[in-house]
Structure formats: structure tokens, C-alpha cells
Image (spheres, grey):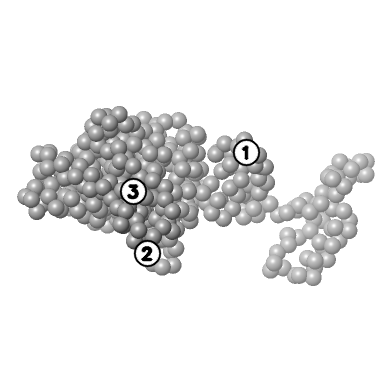
Amino acid sequence: MKKKKETERERGGFKSSRHGSKGAEKRASAAGPKGEQKRAAEAREAAGKKHVSAEASRFLRGKKIDPRRIDGTESVVELIEGTFQAYNSGRLREACQLYADKMLENDVTVGLTLTGALTPAGLGMSCLIPLIEAGFVDWIISTGANLYHDTHFGLGLSMHRGNPTESDVVLREEGVVRIYDIFFDYDVLLSTDAFFRKIIRAPEFQRAMSSAEFHWLCGKYVAAREKVLGLKSKSLLSAAYTCGVPVYTSSPGDSSIGMNVAALALEGYKCVIDPNSDVNETASIVLGAKRGGGKSAIMIMGGGSPKNFALQTEPQIQEVLGIDEKGHDFFLQVTDARPDTGGLSGATPAEAVSWGKIDPDRLPDAVVCYLDSTIALPLMTSYALAKRKKRKLRRLYDQRGALMKRLQLEFEKTL
């Protein structure tokens, strides 16, 4: 009978040796007695016993690395979940899963920040517009440059792939401008500048406004131009206007759009982008997301000023306005910046806890992926659209008044 039981336990010619059972070996450790551990391993091998690793350890609860064989038939979801096992591919897998599985729940408000020349590379059309239209992005903070170059496409202007090793002296002589390996005619800049100056002269622009109001008005005119040209889904600003997604910029004067606003001020026009309104409006969006049991998520492409502007909403609520809050619930960043240089672009979510920017209880729901956004964003977009159904549009732009009223009332209670 005893011999039969041993036979049932045999696996592939090895006898099972389970940790925790009577007479089982002690768990090996690099800190343990080396000679004893070596002899135990040799005795186990000589006896033909199958070693069972100490999977009871909390550190060994992750899924075993046993990737699927890539055969060319796999979907993006299968590729990411089945083969992105470790290092930055592992972080990208975690980012995709955090975004799709948790951040896109119906009670989560998703803010997106954009730095780096993403729209010139076509990521507005390929990724950002589909995410906006699916209800996967509820509000945006972008560099002005991304919004300026986005407008080229809405105006029917073209940008081209190029060779970054070409002579810049020759390119200048030929009237060609480049953003690394993106080439375009210098007249693209002149035509886009002329478009912005024309619309900003309109009466509805002649006042102080938040950058969300400004970009909503710009998006309306870009959408109208797209319609005339027979274009569809070319401009991020146009899509945000249509879907009611507020678009902010943390440095309004730091782009060609801001430069044209400034130029028109010299002509006597009264368009002013008010940073005070931006600070309070973005804080009101986050506060509104958290009230009533909801959650706030920040997805950061790059870093820089837009990252800080999105994360400072919580210190604005807590530290400055004195309203009780705990920080953003979900943090996802794709960046190539290191934390040890001291710049905000590389600052970790753990560091953000000390500022009140991130809820410390939600740190497990924070992922930093050290990767180029132009690689990560298309994969994340495809993964999310494959895994989740479209969400109902929040149309936060239309709710700005109500959100600001709530912020005002809660602030007044602290006085």
C-alpha cells in the first residue's frame, strides 16, 4: 500500500517533495547555511525527488513566466498579456491592465497629460481621438505645441516622414522644417498662424477665459474647417469640442498658439487666457470626481509642466483651499525621465504621496513605464479598445459651472 502511494506521487520519474510536510527540506535561502543547502540539493537530486520551490512566499505569487509562442496570429491583447513578461515590457503590460481593468471603470474620471511632439507624429489621429470618442479620456492637459501641430491636420495641411540625418542647412534653403524625422513645408506654419489669428479676432474671443474655453472655441472653428474640407477625425481639438472634453494647457504662452494671441494683443485685441481659471477648474474636476464615491485617475504621457498641472490639483484642493481629500486614486505614467535627477518628469508616484498628490492607500494602483510614448500609446490604445466597451461621454466641459460651484462652496466652509 505504501509503495502504491509513492507511485501515485511520482511526477516524470521524480518523487514529489512538498515543503511544509513532515520531513520536507527547509526553505533554501542565500542567507542560509551554504554547505547544508548544497548537500540537501545533491541528496534530493540523487534520490530522484522533484524539487518544489517555495511558492508559499508572498514574493512568489506572481504568474509563472511561461510565455505563449509567438506565431503571427496573436492579437495585441494576446501579445501583451502573453509575452510582455518583465522589465519595461512588464511595466507596459501592467500599465495596459491598470488602464483597462481599473481606470476605465464607470466611476473613474480619467485625466490625460501630453508632452513631447505626439500629434505631429500622428498619434492624435491614431490614438487620442479614438480614446476620446470611446469615452476613455475625460479631460486633457497638453503642451500648446501638441495642440498647434494637431491643428495642421484639421486644416488639411500635411506632414511627412523624413530622414533625421538630412542637412538642416539644405532643409532651411528648401523651406522644409523638421521635428526630428517629421518633415513639413514652412508654409504649414504660416498657414496655421494665419488661421489662428483670423479666428481669435472674432468677438467671442475678446475676453479673459480659461484655456479650456479658448480651446473649445478653437475646436469649434477647426471642426467647421474639417467639414468644409470633407475631413473626418483629423484634429484632437475638433474631437474634444465635439465630445465635450475640456482641454487645458499649463503654459499658454509657450507655443505658437500663445505667440499669436500675444501678437494680436499688440493690435488691441482682448483675448486673455487666465491661468487662475485653469488652476481652479482643473481642481474642481478632480474634486467632482471624488465626491459621491467616484475616483480620479491621471494618465501621463511624458512629464513636464502638464504632469505637474494635473497632479497639483490635489495640493490645490487640500493644502491651499483646505478641503479634506486624499489624492488621486490611479497614477499611470509613460516616461523616459529618471527620478534621481530631481526633475518632476521623473518623480515617482511614491514621492508624490508626500505632497498629497497620490492617495497612499492606492500606491499598488500606480505604474511607471520607462518607455517612449510613441511606442506605448498605440499599444495601450489598442489594448483598451479591445478589452473595454465604450463609456458614456462625461462631457465635463458642459459641467464646468456646476463643478466650480461645488469647489466654491466647499472652499467657503473652510474660511
Say whether residue 378 is visible. yes
| Of the image marks 3 and 1, the number of the one nearer the N terminus | 1
- Disc 2 marks a residue whose amino acid type is Gly
| Of the image marks 2 and 3, the number of the one nearer the N terminus | 3
Q: Dots 3 and 1: beta carbons under 8 Å?
A: no
**Label 3 crowding class (10 Å Cα cut-off): few <14, some 14-19, many 20+?**
many
Residue nearest the viewer, comparing 203 with 89: 203
Residue nearest the viewer, comparing 69 with 25: 69
> What kind of element bears circle 2?
loop
| Mark linked to residue 58 | none
Mark nearer the viewer, 3 or 1? 3
Look at 81% across and 51% down and name the residue there: 50
Question: Residue 384, position in %: x, y?
Answer: 47, 38
Image quadrant where residue 231 sits: top left
Which residue bears the numbered disc 1?
A: 72
Q: Residue furthest left?
A: 268
Say whether residue 288 is visible. no
Question: Residue 232, position in %: x, y?
Answer: 33, 31
- Residue 41 vertical placement versus 1 (above, below): below
Which residue bears the numbered disc 3?
A: 184
Q: Separation of disc 2 and disc 1 at Cα? A: 41 Å
Q: Separation of disc 3 and disc 1 at Cα? A: 35 Å
| Of the image marks 2 and 1, the number of the one nearer the N terminus | 1
Which residue bears the numbered disc 2?
A: 343
